[in-house]
Image (cartoon, rainbow, N blue to C red):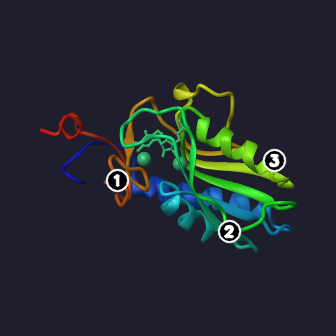
Amino acid sequence: MHSDIEKILVSQEEIEEKCRELGELLAEEYKDKFPLAIGVLKGALPFMSDIVRHMDTYLEMDFMDVSSYGGGTSSSGEVKIEKDLNTKVEGRDLLIVEDIIDSGLTLSYLVDLFKYRKAKSIKVVTLLDKPEGRTVNIEADVVGFKVPNEFVVGYGLDYQEKYRNLPYIGVLKPHVYSGE
Ligand code: 5GP
Ligand code: MG
Ligand code: MG
């Protein structure tokens, strides 16, 4: 375990098992379709990469980068497109792939945007869900794990751009935030 991590909330084995389960479930849902899987950068990168390898079906992948958080640990309430899709979503079956749903602001922004762009259908899969953080009334269709209202890192999730590479989800030791 990394020396900055206080405790592990979801282990590497649990994540691997869940990715298989969710990938197979989604493959079944989209078996007669050609969905566009949209990974929300950068946090969803490991999750997207792992679930699509359990989807034995046709699919296309694209990525979008939006920011709502700045560098800290609480939401600014603003969503900004840093990188847009390269693919037209009109008439497509979309699968939004997220790392975590907290306030729900990012997700509701994306869902509204893709509705406006005339997607045929929109589903959301998220690795983590923090239901207590919700300020907007929105839910993912498929959730990997529910987590408590704590700031988590690892498996795509960062603190000041670090820890995305950890293969598990954990909580940082308090001294990491205070910079001691
Ligand atoms: P929301 O818009 O739902 O509040 O948050 C969406 C984004 O905020 C997530 O995709 C993620 O980038 C970031 N975020 C929310 N909660 C956490 C957390 O506990 N840890 C980290 N590292 N990022 C989070
Ligand atoms: Mg995200
Ligand atoms: Mg972040």
Separation of disc 1 and disc 3 at Cα? 31 Å
Separation of disc 2 and disc 3 at Cα? 16 Å
Under circle 3, the secondary element is: helix
In percent of the image, x 48 and y 36: which residue is there? 147
Contact (CB < 8 A) between labels 1 and 3? no
Disc number lying in front (1 or 3): 3
- Name which quarter of the figure residue 139 lies in: top right
For residue 14, side relative to residue 117 (left or right): left
Q: Earlier in the sequence, mark 2 or mark 1?
A: 2
Q: Where does label 3 land, which residue?
A: 116
- Name which quarter of the figure residue 54 lies in: bottom right
Q: Is mark 1 within 8 Å of ligand 3?
A: yes
Under circle 2, the secondary element is: loop
- Name which quarter of the figure residue 83 lies in: bottom right
Q: Is mark 3 within 8 Å of ligand 1?
A: no
Could you tell me residue 158's position as x and y percent?
37, 50
Disc number lying in front (2 or 1): 2
Separation of disc 2 and disc 1 at Cα? 25 Å
Q: Tell which of 40 and 47 is nearer to you.
A: 40
Q: Residues within 10 Å of mark 1 (few under 14, many from 20)?
A: few
Could you tell me residue 53's position as x and y percent?
60, 71
Could you tell me residue 19's position as x and y percent?
56, 59
Contact (CB < 8 A) between labels 2 and 3? no
Looking at the rendered structure, the kind of residue marked 1 is Glu
Looking at the rendered structure, the kind of residue marked 2 is Asn
Could you tell me residue 49's position as x and y percent?
54, 67
Q: Where does label 2 land, which residue?
A: 86
Q: Where does label 1 land, which residue?
A: 161
For residue 18, side relative to residue 168 (left or right): right
In percent of the image, x 46 and y 53: which residue is there? 14
Looking at the rendered structure, the kind of residue marked 3 is Tyr
